[in-house]
Amino acid sequence: MAEGAARRNDPERRQRIVAAALDVIADRGVSNTTHRRIAAAAGVPLGSVTYYFETLEALLTEAFVQLAEEASDAFRAKLAAATDRDSAREAVIDIISGSVWAEPRTLLLSYELYAFAARHPPVAAIMRRWMNNSRAALERFFDPLTARGLDAFVEGIGIHNSIDLRPLDRAAISDLVARVTNRQLLSEADVHDG
Amino acid sequence: MAEGAARRNDPERRQRIVAAALDVIADRGVSNTTHRRIAAAAGVPLGSVTYYFETLEALLTEAFVQLAEEASDAFRAKLAAATDRDSAREAVIDIISGSVWAEPRTLLLSYELYAFAARHPPVAAIMRRWMNNSRAALERFFDPLTARGLDAFVEGIGIHNSIDLRPLDRAAISDLVARVTNRQLLSEADVHDG
DNA sequence: GCAGCATGTGTACATTTGTACATATCGAAT
DNA sequence: ATTCGATATGTACAAATGTACACATGCTGC
């Protein structure tokens, strides 16, 4: 009874196609992502992909937007559970060291995302929102500069750990996170917090 | 008289094609990089590209390897000029805040590089070497963990600054770099240095 | 039941793509 | 000067690609 709800017998098809697009991107790269491969991955005929999406670029854009939003939500959720500066630090360490950000698939997709965003302003806008959300979540516990530093750290270590044959372990990450967060007292006063 | 030197009347043609490939990648993305566009950018006929490179992938691989090596050399050169911990810190700040790493073109190419490397082991190997070189350069002045932290920082801040509408200024970067480098005394002893 | 329309599908087609290759051209060794 | 191989180029072509579209199908409101 809602407005346009419950279209027909496969109401989630559109979404399934978007998810399939991310799968294809993840294992072939954007440069080898085609209508036909996406259709095959989604288990729908070719015509179905062009029915839901005007162009391939539009589909990829939607897929990347979804990816960014999911990553952003995961980040926020992880930090929402924190109650004080210490647990926030732990959350950041968790994010870096595997549970959220560092899955190979996510990382791989993020490389493709960055490259894509650089040429597609709407996707770049979503990425900016994502970054801002992450920072806002961090700013519940840290001053703005520290928040930005941590955010960049998550990014950088995640990438390097994925390339490196011997990724940093939790203790090392913890050490580095502590350095970035501990010294804020040097230049900044205390921050609002619970 | 050297072995195979001085082929013919356009001895740098091969290299020009590689450079052109990077140009095309930079402004169209890997997914829109074709033999024909590269040929046009290099000012050579199509046949010339296929003459020098077995396949398009081989050409892209070579281009990315060259990119990584150039970036690596630039990083090392910048740090080679440092004489002590303080000047090393300054070098790192320089690298982050613009002179080496943060040019939009380089950053853009690096996204494409990461994505490409994830699917092309030889390129991934070069990237690892690059990372190791960077760390080795940093380890002249800092302990290994600090070196890794700094390296990741360069990566992360560079990326975020390129996305952000208001990039961190030099003072902020300097503050963060100081945090990462200052606290090494907490857990580690002193390091070899000049 | 029926009409109307969103949903769904198979096929067709012009373009673009990677690559092969026949042929040309030039440099260097003899 | 002639030979020979590396360098260079234009053309050709099968395969893949994005997209259009004519047609089918079943849901919804009457």
Image (spheres, coloured by chain):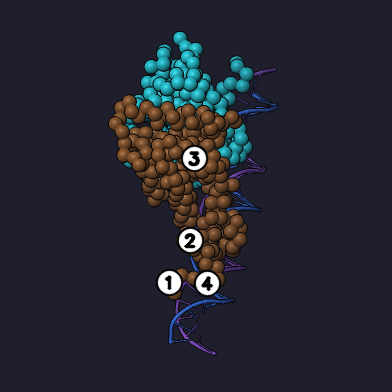
Chain colours: A brown, B cyan, C purple, D blue
> What residue sits right under mark 1 in the picture?
A2
Q: Which residue is mark 3?
A: A95
Which amino acid type is shown beneath numbered disc 3?
Ile
**Residue A12 against residue B14 in the figure, above or below:** below
Instruction: Determine the CA span between mark 2 and mark 4.
Output: 17 Å
| Callout 4 amino acid | Arg
Q: Chain of mark 3?
A: A
Secondary-structure class at tag 2: loop
Please give the name of the residue rendered at 61% of the width and 33% of the height, measured from the top-left corner: B122
Name the residue: 38% across, 17% down: B86
Residue D15 percent coordinates (x, y): 64, 53
Question: Toward the viewer: B15 or A120?
Answer: A120
Q: Amino acid at mark 2?
A: Phe
Chain ID for label 2?
A
Q: Taking A187 as reference, is B87 above or below it?
A: above
Residues at marks 2 and 1, common chain? yes
Q: Amino acid at mark 1?
A: Ala
Element at label 4: loop
Q: Do tags 4 and 1 sit on the same chain?
A: yes
**Quadrant into which the N terminus of chain A falls:** bottom left
Q: Which mark is residue A53?
A: 2
